Each structure stands twice: as structure tokens, then as C-alpha cells.
Amino acid sequence: MENTPSAAVDRDSPRSTAQASPTTPGPDVYRLINVLKRREKGGNVFELHIPEMVVGPGQFVALVGASGCGKSTLLDMLAMVLRPTSATEFSITVPRTGRQHHVMEMDDEAMARVRMAQLGYVLQTGGLLPFLSVRDNIMLPCRINGINDRRAEVDMLVQRLGISGQMSKKPAHLSGGQRQRVAIARALAHRPPIVLADEPTAAVDKYTARDIRDEFKELTQQMQVTLLMVTHDESLVAGVVDRTFGFKVKKLNDQHTQSTLLEEK
């Protein structure tokens, strides 16, 4: 998912916000109550039910499930790319401003503005633009948001991630682990208060995956970011995340599948 809308910077832009600490009690970042997403294709129906999902500021949350359970559908809704079919409540509150957004009442342009300024996103394969250098890929969200004073912080980020020697290269010349580290740096470059990651370690070996997980967690904690990560590997997040949500999948008939999001206690 690479969304680079051309709309003007929202008043919630990171460059104009005070930096409150989301590790202290505050408004819930996400509140999803009785949310339904129904999708139909070729006579097949898939329904994702979310009875309740409440995510607090600064939490590291894992969304764990097998292929086809609705993980990516949920992440696309959290990213304000996909609109729910129905919801009692679906709200996002930006931790640093306290401004609440009710997704069901927003048009596409309003969702794009919030997504552009307030969210970082890491794709399974990195999602880097092949015609841009590593540095230009990382700085892209800053340029889109009109932020010109992040170079020192970005240099710190890439140093921490061990990719400072790769900045002039194109993505094709990077290893899988390096591409994911670049994607993490890009997601954090404009200092969004929320980061969503879709299987960010699926394309690397298990040792590199653990290193990337630990680096990602450490950086988001230091930057006071709320992190939601999708994975199919529960062992990768066990004992590491603050909370874990899973999916209970039920086949109602040959053409109708129902998945329900449940928090694992």
C-alpha cells in the first residue's frame, strides 16, 4: 500500500504538534466497537467482525493469524484505506494533538490527509520505490508533508538501523533485511504517532526477523509511537508485545467465511 496523496498538509501535521508522551494515560488511539467489513467476489463472501478493539497510546500490538483470516483487511481499515461496512464506533485519536477522527463520518480526502500526516506504514516487501535512492525513499514522507528539518533525526535513524552506508544505493542493490530496515526508517522519518506494519519480517530469515523486531520496538518506544504489527508467526511476538489479537475463522458454507477478531489473554 503506497499512498502519496497530493492534498495539502492537515493541521494535524507532525511539524506543528507538541510532543506529548503517549506512554502516559491518554485518549485511546483506536476505538473499534462492533465493526464489520463485508467483501464479496465471484459469489464468495468474507466477513470480518471486530466486537471490540481498543488500543492505547504507545502500545505495541500484534495482529496474529494465518493467511486469509482478515489481517490485511483489518490493517487497511486501521490505515484508513478501506472503509468499514458498518460500525457502532470507529475512531482514531492522534496522541500528540488529542484530535479525534470518526472514520465513518469522513470523506476520502479527509482520511487521506490524516493518513499522510499521522501514519507510518511498513509493507511486507518494503514497498520501496525502485527509481529512488535509499535516502530519497526515506525522506519521501517528509517531502510529502512539507517537513524540511528532519535530516539530523533521519541520519540518527539510519545509523541506529545500520543502513547509513546504503543511502546512495537503489533498493535493487539491497538485501532483504536492508530493504526492511529502510522501510522502517521511511515509516518513522516524519515522526508519525502511529505506525502500521504488515508482516515486516516475512521476507527474511528468523534471526534477521528477530533483530528487525527488536530494532523496530526499541525505536518506536523511544519515539513514543503506537505500533500495530501483523504477523503469521506468534512466536515472533510472544513475550515482546504489549497485547496480541487473533482471529477465529468459521466457514459458514462453501462460499461464506466469517472471521472474528479476539484479544488473546
Image (cartoon, rainbow, N blue to C red):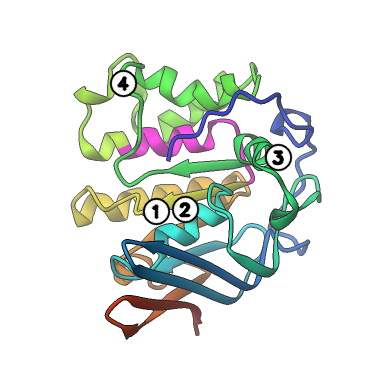
The residue sitting at 66% across, 19% down in the picture is: 146
Helix, strand or loop status at disc 1: helix
Q: Earlier in the sequence, mark 4 or mark 3?
A: 3
Amino acid carrying mark 2 in the image? Lys
Q: Residues within 10 Å of mark 1 (few under 14, many from 20)?
A: few
Q: Earlier in the sequence, mark 4 or mark 1?
A: 4
Query: Which disc is residue 217 wearing?
Result: 2
Q: Which mark is residue 110?
A: 3
Mark 1 and mark 3 residues within 8 Å of each other at the beta carbon:
no
Circle 1 is placed at which residue position? 214
Whole-number angstrom distance, CA of label 2 to CA of label 4? 22 Å
Q: Earlier in the sequence, mark 3 or mark 2?
A: 3
- Dot 4 falls on a residue whose secondary structure is helix
Q: Identify the disc placed on residue 172.
A: none
Which label's residue is closer to the chain start, 1 or 3?
Answer: 3
Residue projecting furthest to the front: 43
Magenta segment boundaries in residue numbering = 180-193
The span from disc 1 to disc 2 (Cα, nearest Å) is 5 Å
Q: Residue at x 52, y 28 (%)?
A: 4
**Could you tell me the amino acid type at mark 1?**
Asp
Q: Nearer the viewer, mark 1 or mark 3?
A: 3
Between discs 2 and 4, the one toward the N terminus: 4
Q: Quadrant of residue 44?
A: bottom left
x, y percent for residue 202: 26, 53
In the rendered image of this protein, does residue 82 appear above or below residue 235? above
Q: Which residue is label 4 attached to?
A: 165
Check disc 4 and give the amino acid type.
Answer: Gly
| As drawn, 169 above or below 207 | above
Question: Are the two marked residues, 2 and 4, in contact with CB atoms closer than 8 angstroms?
Answer: no
Q: Residues within 10 Å of mark 4 (few under 14, many from 20)?
A: few
Q: Is residue 100 left or right of residue 217?
A: right
Instruction: Tell me where residue 138 appears, x and y as whole percent.
Output: 45, 26
